[in-house]
Image: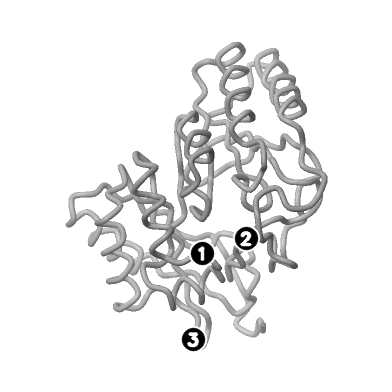
Amino acid sequence: MALHPPEHIVYGPVRSRRLGASLGVNLLPAGMKVCNMNCVYCQYGWTRGAAHYRGEGVGWPTPYAVETAVSERLHRAAARDELIDRITIAGHGEPTLHPELEEIAERLCAARDRIAPLIPIAILSNSTTCMYYDVRNALRRVDERHMKLDAGDPFTLRTINGSPVPIQAIIDGLLALRPLTVQSMFVADARGRVKNIGEGAVSEWLAAIERVRPIAVHVYTLDRGPALASLRPASPRRLREIAEHVRAAGIPAHVFTSGFQQSEHSST
């Protein structure tokens, strides 16, 4: 079952496999998924009416509202001596679609520096907007950029991510943004028709990784219910094999396996 999109700007901290105790920051309109991709594994379900441009629609939180909400939450955490490993800009869709992302990044960094200077700020992005200069400026303000790259060829990109942005534009944007960490989800459906774990798809993906040369690659698989109900996690063995290919190219790779359980009788 898909998760319901959060109603508030700040949520958590949630326990993340990759980021620890993560205080989430949602830059999207409350209660609705806003994304320009339609990933088969999305925990928030299918994208209904994909965003065609940044800032499309109404209800985007203002930079002031984001700064205020995060500041108040950090003050409460400090008063309770609460553990927060990261402040993570994520939410229920693509955060870089926010039309005032650069100002938000500036305000968030300033609030963090005042209240909790030791906590890094991370962002999780699908990499489709980093060809824009102002988005890259915003992304460079935060400490960690975790950028999606699940495919290295057009067919797999469409099959897994439903992306309207060409793979070459994504790779070029990542090259312009470096340094960054690549996050890559590997999955296959029950019939083997929707997958990116095969030798051909992995070879194309690895070629893209070698071009981008990230500081690290996070190789992982399903941990929550996906949009496509027949989707299955990649096996730990396959994830380790993929990571070894990355390491052989001289790039650090970290594997995160699945705790996701699914009935064999699930259907699309």
Distance of mark 1 from mark 2, alpha carbons? 9 Å
Q: Position of residue 122 (x, y in %)?
A: 51, 35
Of 116 and 214, the residue lying toward us = 214
Location of residue 67 by image quarter: top right
In this figure, which residue is indicated by the disc labeled 3? 193
Residue flagged by tag 2: what amino acid is it? Asn
Q: Position of residue 116 (x, y in %)?
A: 57, 16
N-terminal-most mark, 3 or 1? 1
For the residues bearing labels 1 and 2, Cβ distance under 8 angstroms: yes
Helix, strand or loop for disc 2? loop
Q: Specify the label residue 36 is tagged with.
A: 2
Is 238 on the left-hand or right-hand side of 133?
A: left
Identify the amino acid type marked 1.
Answer: Val
Q: Position of residue 151 (x, y in %)?
A: 40, 67
Q: Quadrant of residue 106?
A: top right
For the C terminus, the quadrant is: bottom right
Which-is-in-front pick, marks 2 and 3?
2
- Using a 10 Å C-alpha cutoff, classify the residue at mark 1 as few (fewer than 14 neighbours), some (14 to 19) or many (20 or more): some
Distance (Cα) linking label 2 and label 3: 23 Å
Numbered badge on residue 165: 1
